[in-house]
Amino acid sequence: NLPVVAVVGRPNVGKSTLVNRILGRREAVVEDTPGVTRDRVFYEAEWTGHDFWLVDTGGWEDRVQGIAYRVAEQAEIAIDLADVVMFVVDATVGITTTDEQLLKVLRKAKRPVLLVANKVDDARTEMEAAALWNLGLGQPHVVSATHGRGSGDLLDAVVAAL
Ligand code: GDP
Ligand code: MG
């Protein structure tokens, strides 16, 4: 009965890459093509002696049909199961209308949310990530899932929220 940490966000923001970074191994499927992770996938994870389930989800999208609808539904189930939600956005793109729609879902779910600004590979993107304070989710946790920067601080915040 470990606590559950769900990783949600629209397709291609780097959720699976971040999950692999946290696990320290390549298990979650990373793809340049959006929508590869279709289900909720549970991984057992640990940080500073705290064990938890890390749940990778397919990319959440609004008003979609067919497979994409099922993917969105799985993300919503993961949010319901979660003790803490990592809401991943792509700092190189900024907030899209899809991100805003997902934010509405998250507010309704009333779960603790950590805002993760991913793909902050350089100083310029770091400046852009500062604008994410405007979302009202508190401090944006700035990370680069591919380079590994910020993941330790993010995990400290995750276990503090458990
Ligand atoms: P998901 O759909 O949200 O699970 O996203 P993926 O983890 O599959 O990643 C989608 C694409 O973004 C892949 O090409 C990744 O290599 C890339 N990506 C993920 N994290 C980063 C990052 O921190 N920086 C950069 N530049 N690219 C990233
Ligand atoms: Mg994925």
Image: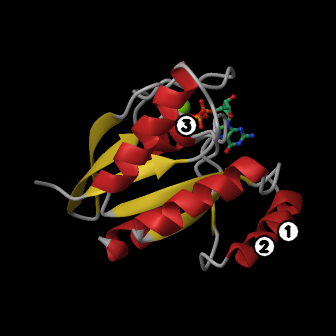
Where does the image place residue 20, in percent across and percent down from the top left? Answer: 45, 37
- Spatial separation of the CA atoms under disc 3 and disc 2: 22 Å
Q: Which amino acid is tagged 1?
A: Met
Q: What residue is shown at x 77% (from left), y 52% (from top)?
A: 97
Asked if the residue under mark 2 is in contact with the one under mark 3, i.e. CB atoms within 8 Å, the reply is no
Seen from the viewer's position, the closer of residues 77 and 34 is 77
Residue at mark 3: C-beta within 8 A of ligand 1 = yes
The reply to whether callout 3 and callout 1 are in contact (CB within 8 Å) is no
Instruction: Pick the quarter of the image with the N terminus.
Output: bottom left
Q: Is residue 24 above or below residue 156?
A: above
Q: Earlier in the sequence, mark 3 or mark 1?
A: 3
Quarter of the image containing the C terminus? bottom left
Residues at marks 2 and 1 touching, judged by CB atoms closer than 8 Å:
yes
**In this view of the protein, can residue 118 be seen by the observer?**
no
> What amino acid is found at the position of numbered circle 3 in the picture?
Thr
Q: Quadrant of residue 27?
A: top left
Q: Secondary structure at mark 1?
A: helix
Q: Along the horizontal axis of the image, is 9 left or right of 90?
A: left
- Identify whether 145 is placed above or below 149: above
Q: Residue at coordinates 28% horizontally, 53% vertically from top-left?
A: 81
Q: Position of residue 107 (x, y in %)?
A: 51, 68
How packed mark 2 is, by other alpha carbons closer than 10 Å (few <14, some 14-19, many 20 or more), is: some
Q: Which residue is mark 2?
A: 130
From the image, tell me which residue sits under label 1: 127
In the rendered structure, which amino acid carries the disc numbered 2? Ala
Secondary structure beneath label 3: helix
Residue 17: numbered disc:
3
